[in-house]
Amino acid sequence: MSQSNYKYRVGELRPSQILFSFGVGAVLDLPNLSVMVMGLEDWNTQQGVVELGEQRLLAAIRRELGQQVKKLLAPPIPAEDASSGSPFDEYARTGIPVAPFPGWMVCPKCRLLAPLYPYFQLKENPYRPDQTRYVHLNCSKSQKKDPTAIPSRFLVSCDRGHLDDFPWLYFVHRGNTACKGSIRLEEYGVSGSPSDIVVKCNGCNSERRLSDAFGELAKKNMPRCRGRHPHLRNFDESCDEQMKTILLGASNSWFPITLSALSIPITSNQLEQLVEQNWTVLGKTNNLNALEVLLQAFSAIGQLQELSKYKTDRIWSVIQQKQLQHQQQSNIDDESARDLKTPEWQVFSSADPNLNTPDFQLRPVKPPSGYENYFSQVVLVERLREVRALIGFTRIQSPGDFIDSGEILTEHRVALSRSNPKWVPASEVKGEGIFIQFQETTLHQWEKNLKLQDYKLQAVDAHRNWCRVRSLDPDKIHFPGIRYILLHSFAHALMRQMALECGYNAASLKERIYSKRPEDEGGPMAGILIYTAAPDSEGTLGGLVSLGEPKTLGYHIDQALEQMRLCASDPLCAEHTPFKGATSLHWAACHACLFSPETSCERGNKYLDRAVLISTVLTTDLAFFPEVKV
């Protein structure tokens, strides 16, 4: 946290939270403070950061943010033994920068509502960061000690990602004013409802209920957005959006936009694999002598030992070749950077053990008995590495509909920095998974079903209607296709079964859907990867892979499909369509059957339907699996 030129600790976060819960631009609720994570210009990248290597992901990010992006950096983490030192040591300055937000506080004793400065003073405790707080000095209602101030719990935002303090002076005076009176926030009752909260001005005796700032009344009573980005400390030149009042800590105040890629091998040559794995270090060498010095330095600390069995000039030859390849790729607007999944599909579907590396190991097995006509193969992914990067965020409107590079709408994305970023925050996890490849001939035959053709027309209409309601261009956000709905629904059903019967936490399992029609560029794709991963250097322990053995997997698929036949919410669930009630993008799916945690689903629980998997109480015409063994 920053005040003037002094920095001090105010709390702790896990590295994964910086990407998915409290990243740049997000408001973080601490025990006695409310703070915002600041933009990339304020981050200290000289201490405690590690550069992550994943060239495919970096290429996709450059396509979105520009060729100036050079690095993927893990968030700064203090050394393991740093916590035993003094809070005034240098390690205490290692972390991510935050600043107080919102800028208005409320005194719980006298109910004064005022800006932070000069009415409230920061009280810090370097030995107990969780006790850092703002206090109201000389409070008229408190005689013994200065009371701890409370952040104002009302903010304003807009669809273009701007966030601002609630316009208290404008609101209570019903417009711009020169009144210098103090403002108080009075609450009547215990419900906390805006209708029970009154804003009062002691100078001119104006007052107003906060309910006037919500709903249809807000369109008449609230000013237009100022275009403020508090994490960047700047304002956009213009914004014609209507301000929307939101609560501090509201779930729609920050949605991360992330891209992820699996580290897949590109060659069976062991030396080339080693160079690729250590490219963040080796790629910076510019001559043979520098390489020799680098290898000697790392050998002295016990790193890069695998390279010691190769001659230095041979290593340098491979490095030169890769540097030339990267230079050529950076000079060309490579369309392949848009598609992160096709290279992964090619590796999974070929399942060549000769390509195995320490971070990526595949073992193909037979499909479960009775499912040979539905699945062409099952691949046990005994080791995998995933690198994830934060490239922006949205407010009010979730980006969960944009899953691939090239589909992200830039007009909704808020930047992480004032200028074009040269790096983005990233994290890596290691784990295991099960890849299931569907039988293309069976799938193609299913897609010819006449009933399914009518269903497809309805699905496309629902997709376009959903886009229109959210002022999105349906030509830019493509309908993923009927086979995607099938693959997506099957992945959710299987993840749910594994979580219920095998002891896995539902949020610890994730999906990766590979879906393309035969007429699409690059040929057909039809497969799912269900995986789990952890930030630990050793990854996970093999429990998920053991579930992929043919006999065990067959049992779990049987049970998963049987559970989908009848939902606890039937017949309401089975009868649901995207055209009923609020606009949605799911059919027979709900929290009792197919919905998964947000961290598990790549599409925000959209494009799901039990009816394409198995017969339901409403329909039997769409099922890909017509019968279930019990």
Image: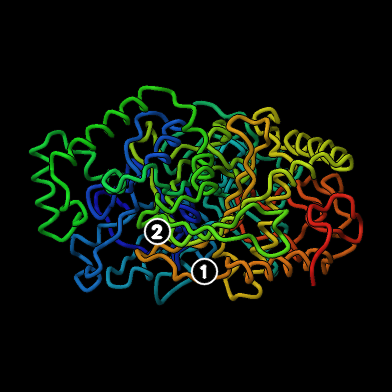
Quadrant housing the N terminus: bottom left
Q: CB atoms at circles 2 and 1 under 8 Å apart?
A: no
- Residue 282: give x, y in percent of width and height: 21, 43
- Residue 136: give x, y in percent of width and height: 42, 63
For disc 2, the marked residue is 15
253 sits to left or right of 443: left
For disc 1, the marked residue is 109
Residue 225 seen from this side: yes
Q: Determine whether 326 is above or below 270 in the image.
A: above
Residue 153 seen from this side: no
Residue at figure coordinates x 67%, y 59% from the top left: 492
Of circles 2 and 1, the one toward us is 2
Residue at figure coordinates x 52%, y 42% from the top left: 346
Q: Amino acid at mark 1?
A: Lys
Q: Determine whether 265 is above or below 594 in the image.
A: above
Residue at figure coordinates x 29%, y 48% from the top left: 270
Identify the image's colour scheme: rainbow, by chain, secondary structure or one colour: rainbow
Q: Amino acid at mark 2?
A: Pro
Q: Secondary structure at mark 1?
A: loop
